[in-house]
Amino acid sequence: MVKKTDDLLFEIIELIFTAGISKIEEKQYYIEKSLAKLDILKLFLRILWETKAIDNKKYMNISKPLNEIGKMLGSWNKNLLK
């Protein structure tokens, strides 16, 4: 079953919040799960762009913040692995 993109976005927000309030040994699970859902969301966005369902400007306006979130989550995950 394919989820709606807004459902994915809310799940990502919930996972990030949960990671923030979780015990240190649980944080990585939630961060990795949010990274996976973020990748799915970015895939859906790319499909919309490639099928011309959204134009270049909208694609850039949405993908830029998603990429920044991915970088932040990746750094957080990397720090937890140390």
Image (spheres, grey):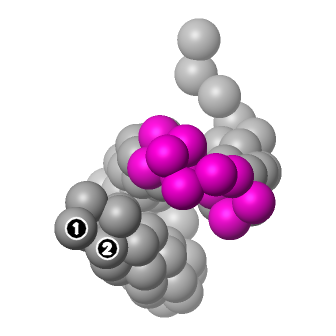
Q: Secondary structure at mark 1?
A: loop
Q: Amino acid at mark 1?
A: Lys
Find out whether residue 16 is within the magenta segment. no
Q: Residues within 10 Å of mark 1 (few under 14, many from 20)?
A: few
Q: Quadrant of the C terminus?
A: bottom left
- Residue 36 located left or right of residue 6: left
View extreme (top): residue: 1
What residue is shown with label 2? Answer: 79
Q: Residues within 10 Å of mark 2 (few under 14, many from 20)?
A: few
Residue 77 visible in the snapshot? yes
**Looking at the image, which is closer to me, 4 or 58?**
4
Q: Is residue 66 above or below residue 32?
A: below
Magenta region? 19-30
Prevailing SS of the magenta stretch? helix
Q: Position of residue 21 (x, y in %)?
A: 75, 60
The disc at residue 12 is: none
Q: Position of residue 48 (x, y in %)?
A: 46, 53
Q: Is residue 28 above or below residue 74?
A: above
Residue at 69 percent across and 52 percent down: it is: 22
The disc at residue 82 is: 1
Q: Please identify the quarter of the rendering in which residue 19 is found.
A: bottom right
Q: Quadrant of the N terminus?
A: top right
Find out whether residue 29 is within the magenta segment. yes
- Residue 53 located left or right of residue 73: right
Q: Are marks 1 and 2 in contact (CB under 8 Å)?
A: yes
Residue at 52 percent across and 83 percent down: it is: 65
Q: Position of residue 12 (x, y in %)?
A: 64, 52
